[in-house]
Image (cartoon, rainbow, N blue to C red):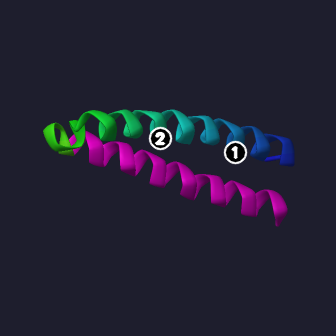
């Protein structure tokens, strides 16, 4: 992948992180994390995975 390709993936992952974080915030604001704990956990995992992938692409781009 070229540095531009890595940057594009990093940017897309950032959008996923931000969108998912907004959903998590709505869950928190409405108490949904208690009503739907499995879905809440999935949202947390999405953010965690996206951050890890973002880090990998950043390292690849810089390395």
Q: Looking at the picture, how far across and down is residue 51, in whole percent?
A: 56, 54
Residue at 26% in and 33% down? 30
Residue at 28% in and 43% down? 40
Residue at 76% in and 46% down? 6
Task: Tell me which secondary structure the magenta stretch mostly adopts.
Answer: helix
Tell me: 5 left or right of 18. Answer: right
> In this picture, which residue range is highlighted in magenta?
38-63
- Residue at the farthest bottom position: 63
Tell me: 4 left or right of 39. Answer: right
Q: Quadrant of the C terminus?
A: bottom right
Q: Looking at the picture, how far across and down is residue 31, in whole percent?
A: 22, 38
Between disc 2 and disc 1, the foreground one is 2
Q: How crowded is mark 1: few (under 14 residues within 10 Å), some or many (20 or more)?
A: many
Q: Is residue 2 magenta?
A: no
Residue at 31% in and 44% down? 42
**Residue 63, relative to residue 11: is it above or below?**
below
Tell me the SS state at disc 1: helix
- Residue at the farthest left position: 35
**Residue 18, relative to residue 50: is it above or below?**
above
Q: Quadrant of residue 13?
A: top right
Q: In which quarter of the image is residue 46?
A: top left
Residue 21's mark?
2
Residue 26's mark?
none
Residue 10's mark?
1
- Whichever of callouts 2 and 1 sits on the residue coming sooner in the sequence is 1
Q: Does the magenta stretch include residue 47?
A: yes
């Amino acid at each position: 992948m070229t540095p531009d390709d890595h940057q594009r993936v990093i940017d897309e992952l950032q959008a996923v992180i931000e969108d998912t974080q907004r959903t998590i915030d709505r869950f928190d604001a409405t108490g949904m994390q208690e009503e739907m704990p499995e879905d809440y956990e999935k949202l947390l995992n999405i953010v965690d995975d996206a951050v890890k992938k973002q880090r990998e692409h950043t390292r690849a781009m810089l390395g």
